Amino acid sequence: MTIRHLKIFIAVAETGSMSTAANRLYLTQPTVSQAIRDLEEHYHVQLFERLHKKLFITEEGRQLLNLALMAVGNFDSLELSMQRFQERIPLRIGSSLTVGTCLMSKVISDMEKDYPRMDIYSFVSNTAEIEQKLLRRELDVAVVEGIIESPELTSIPIVEDSLVLVCGKNHEFYQKDIVYASELEGRKFAIREKGSGTRKLFEQYLSTHNIHIQTSWEANCPRTIINAVIYNNALAVMSQRLVKHECMHSSVKIFRYETGEWDRYFKLVYLKRNSDLTNPPCSPAGGKASSPGIQSLRTVLERYRTLNHPREIPACIFKNDIS
């Protein structure tokens, strides 16, 4: 038996007439009569009695009517829910801590305005955990600053960023316009936790140039690191995007690496099976995302591609004097 049979039966029970039920359902009367016969034969019961050219529902018919109303109601609710689901676009976005702190709130706000049908869930952690969540299909897409290791993931550089050396007003570096790499030896630093892309890039630099620092703070919260710089006289290497406000208010000073070795990109990351977005969408050869959510995120991220260097931020320099 089908939902169609039950809907016809309900219409006959409510109207007490095959012809009236047929008119309500825009069916022929023979079609309605056949549906009732099908039900009676299937359940081996009589559903209606005809007296004086009127139909009267039987006790068995009343029991079926109660169950049919429940079944049809549940089915209609299911249909409505699924239609609403199809009208929404769920998107689970991961972001590393730096990206989540300085960029993703603006990006998600833009997406909610531009794509109101999108249901966005955001998860923020370090790059290593975000990568694992993508591989376990717990996230659809991510924006991270760190290096992605898995060959199952596509990683597209999309938003400019740069690490800078940061010091507070009470640090001796604050009076300098140039800081040399050798001056970092033995200094107190506030650094990110293991698994952070920022930490990994900085540690690679220290190892390459054989520089040893003292880790006085280790935190997975960028705000904690900034506070350690301002109030505890620690140094830090972090995204320039994170300290724009503090620079403009002169509570910290930043030094940009003159060689560009600390320049990097925030990357759009997703499983390779989702689509090939390696080429720009405007390119004739560009791939189009099979996921509209991923493509929408990429479109919004393009607005934040450029890393601006505001005039209010002093152009101090970090130089490498160690081979």
Image (cartoon, grey):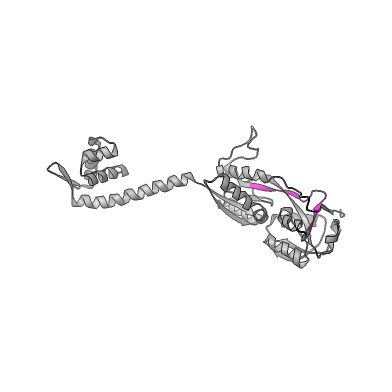
Q: What stretch is highlighted in magenta?
A: 253-268
Residue at position x 22%, y 51% in the image: 62
Quarter of image, res 243: bottom right
Residue 27 to residue 131: above or below? above
- Residue 259 part of the magenta segment: yes
Q: Is residue 152 visible?
A: no
Q: Residue at x 62, y 49 (%)?
A: 107
Tell me residue 165's x, y (percent): 78, 57
Query: Is 264 in front, or is 50?
Result: 50
> For residue 135: magenta?
no
Give the left or right position of residue 28, taking residue 105 as reference: left
Q: Which of 1 and 243 is in front in this view?
A: 243
Total labels: the figure holds 0
- Percent coordinates x, y for residue 321 in the rendering: 87, 54
In-image side of 204 versus 50 (left or right) = right
In the image, taking residue 52 as reference, residue 42 lies left or right, namely right
Drawn side of residue 322 relative to residue 307, left or right: right
Q: Is 112 or 268 nearer to us in this picture?
A: 112
What x and y, as percent, mark residue 273? 57, 43
Q: Main secondary structure of the magenta part?
A: strand
The residue positioned 29% from the left and 36% from the top of the image is 26
